[in-house]
Image (tube, rainbow, N blue to C red):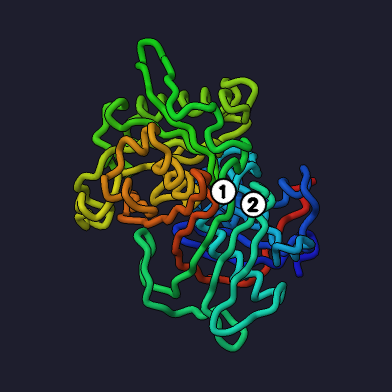
Amino acid sequence: MIRDSITLNCSIIRGGTSKGIFFLESSIPPAGAMRDQILLSVFGSPDLRQIDGLGGANSLTSKVCIIGPSIREDADVDYTFGQVSVDKPIIDWKGNCGNLTAGVGIFAIEQNLLKVTEPTTTVRIFNTNSQKIIHATYQVKDGKVIVDGDYSIPGVPGTGPKIKIEFFDPAGSITGKLLPTGNVKDRIDLGEKGLYTISIVDAGNPVVYMIAEELGLKGTELPVEVEGMPKVLAIIEEVRSIAAEMIGIVSDRSVATAKSPAYPKIGFVSPPQDYINPEGILIEAHQVDLVSRLASMQKMHRAYMITGAISTGAAASIQGTVVHDAISQRAKDSNTLIIGHPYGPMEVSVDKENETVIKEGVYRTARKILDGQVYIPYSRIG
């Protein structure tokens, strides 16, 4: 133990295409300024390199998960997610990270927070951010989650066991409504910068969908290409800020970037078409039902958020949204949607009853990378 530092036990776990730092709820202070200050120091924020902490200098690797036993009858554990800003002293606690949900059960089982059954264990998760129930099912042997498997997901090297993640009653995660404005489409007029058609759909997380063509894009651009287009990025963030005000996440669009940088998410969609992924692999139009790109924390997401996929699946099932307009006929005739994200196809299933989305499902891989202790100098929280 380092005497002039706080010492905290933690685990680093990759879930899907994200990586996060996991803490037992009982090991850190309760919600508030002190907890945020400690966690910012853990990650090394604010600093573009996060050189003095555990963060990976990217929104996909600057995430915190806090896990504890649940008192709810329908859940085994409570899971609180925080999106830690890389370059600002901010942690956004408003929404969930679906990718890291795949890691919650691994941590919970390792910490003996629930009874384990073989050959599979379903961990019932209550996400405190969205107030929603999620089930994650793992392959288990000798009381431990199996590490090796033959399932792969685009954007992650190698393979692992297939983890089923089911989101129950996903609508209205932050705003309380599937269509927060009450409309399947809205228009945003930016004057000389253009008129943009959007759909805002809140399922898993609220996402603002734009039409790639209206942004002057094909829709197949990779994240690094879009980040080389400052005018496009500025328009996307201006539209996101206006949408944040429209759906009540902030009271004034001018403070959206500072006060709610992570929510709503935003992206653009286009019909199925061929594209080359970052690894040089051709993704053919017939392999996907639409092409989509999402952004988070004012940066383009390198792959695709799971909560974003849940929102996209719901949006695809609603006639008249810009997402439904873009999808293939195959998707319109089924309860599955194959999203063409930067690295390749991702499938999401959508179960509905009387036009109400009752459950959505995806498959991920996840694994624990490290158990250890992190040291926070007292001077950083003084």
Q: Is residue 162 above or below residue 199?
A: below
- Which residue is pictured at 54% across the width and 84% down the height? 119
- Circles 2 and 1, Cβ within 8 Å, touching? The answer is yes
N-terminal of the pair, mark 2 or mark 1, is: 2
**Mark 2, residue position:** 132
- CA neighbours of label 2 inside 10 A, class few (<14), some (14 to 19), many (20+): some
- Which residue is pictured at 34% across the width and 60% down the height? 154
| Amino acid type, mark 2 | Lys
Q: Is residue 52 visible?
A: no
Q: CA distance from mark 2 to mark 1?
A: 7 Å
- Which of the labelled discs sits on residue 170, or is there none? 1
Which residue is most to the front?
354
- Which residue is pictured at 59% across the width and 76% down the height? 121
Q: Is residue 186 visible?
A: yes
Foreground of the two, 261 or 87:
261
The image quarter containing residue 318 is top left
In the picture, measured across the screen, residue 144 lies left or right of residue 4, that is left
Secondary structure of residue under mark 2: strand
- CA neighbours of label 1 inside 10 A, class few (<14), some (14 to 19), many (20+): many
- Total numbered labels: 2
Q: Is residue 371 above or below residue 233?
A: below
Q: Tell me residue 282's x, y (percent).
A: 19, 55
Which residue is most to the bottom?
142
Q: Tell me residue 79's x, y (percent).
A: 67, 58
In the picture, measured across the screen, residue 254 lies left or right of residue 158, that is right
In the picture, measured across the screen, residue 8 lies left or right of residue 353, that is right
Q: Tell me residue 116's x, y (percent).
A: 65, 80
